[in-house]
Amino acid sequence: MTTSRKKLTLDIVLDVVCPWCYIGFRGLDWALMALSFDYTLDVRFRPYRLDPECPPEGRDRESTLARKFPDPAVRLASKKALVDAMQDVGLSFDPETPSRLPDTTDSHRLIRWAAEEGLAHEVVAGLFEAYWQHGEDVSRPDVLAQIASAAGLDEDEIRQRLATSEDRHAVRQEAAELRGGGLAGVPGFIINEAAGFEGALPKADLLAAIRQLAEETDAPD
């Protein structure tokens, strides 16, 4: 006798230039393996722009962070917390590897197109790896096309779509609506379009938080 599994719709709101989002993404992977035994999962990736005013050419990362966090002690404590959180999800990367903070609009466009083919997870993983492990500029069409190809998308088609304005306004509008709707930081997790929380929790706490909200809410039809 088989027992039907409850449906769970889970939105993760992220920006690929956010190191805590990378950690949250990896923690979610771990949680999803456990949740898959009890739920039919529908995971969706939603856009967030850490810097909505970022110019097309991006910004120098070091000077931008120094202006935002002028106290070196605060930056050092943040880096230590980041390294500790990495260990919990089995990640290892140097937060100083990227030299630029790029405009991530096109990264989010690529994620949206990948979702149409059921390949959003692969593209998000590729974007995080390219930026945080290798310091690549994930606003460049050639970098994005290579990530798309590695994930299983048609590279030539992606290059052509990136050369247009397709979905640029839609991505920016959705990101603005999520920010304006009360999401103060990322990663953000929205359960069944009804409840959510923010932050890269330790993976066991992340799983527990998702389970609790999944039991308290019903997935949309």
Image: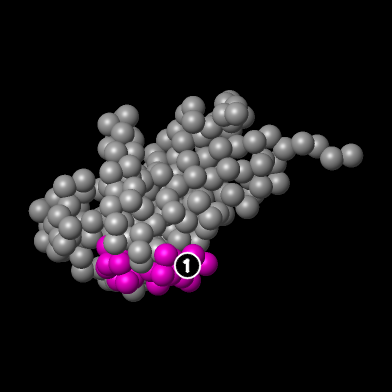
Residue 125: x %, y % from top left: 45, 62
Left/right placement of residue 208 relative to residue 57 reads right
Q: Which residue is mark 1?
A: 154
The secondary element bearing badge 1 is classed as loop
- Residue 128: name its quadrant: bottom left
User: What amino acid is labelled 1 in the image?
Assistant: Asp
What stretch of residues is rendered in magenta?
A: 136-157
Residue 108: x %, y % from top left: 35, 52
- Image point 29% across, 61% down: which residue? 163
Question: Depth check: 16 or 149 in front?
Answer: 149
Tell me which secondary structure the magenta stretch mostly adopts.
helix
- Image point 32% across, 71% down: which residue? 142
Residue 214: x %, y % from top left: 58, 33
Residue 25: x %, y % from top left: 46, 53
Left/right placement of residue 45 relative to residue 204 reads left
- Image point 17% across, 58% down: which residue? 56
Please rate how many residues cluster around mark 1, counting C-alpha atoms within 10 Å: few if below 14, some from 14 to 19, many from 20.
few
Q: Is residue 47 magenta?
A: no
* Residue ranking furthest to the right: 1
Report whether residue 119 is seen.
Answer: yes
Question: Depth check: 48 or 86 in front?
Answer: 48
User: Which quadrant: the C terminus?
Assistant: top right
State the scheme by which the image is colored.
one colour
Up/down of 158 relative to 11, above or below: below
Question: Depth check: 29 or 201 in front?
Answer: 29
User: Which quadrant: the N terminus?
Assistant: top right
- Image point 44% across, 58% down: which residue? 124
Report whether residue 147 is seen.
Answer: no
Left/right placement of residue 46 relative to residue 43 reads left
Q: Is residue 147 magenta?
A: yes
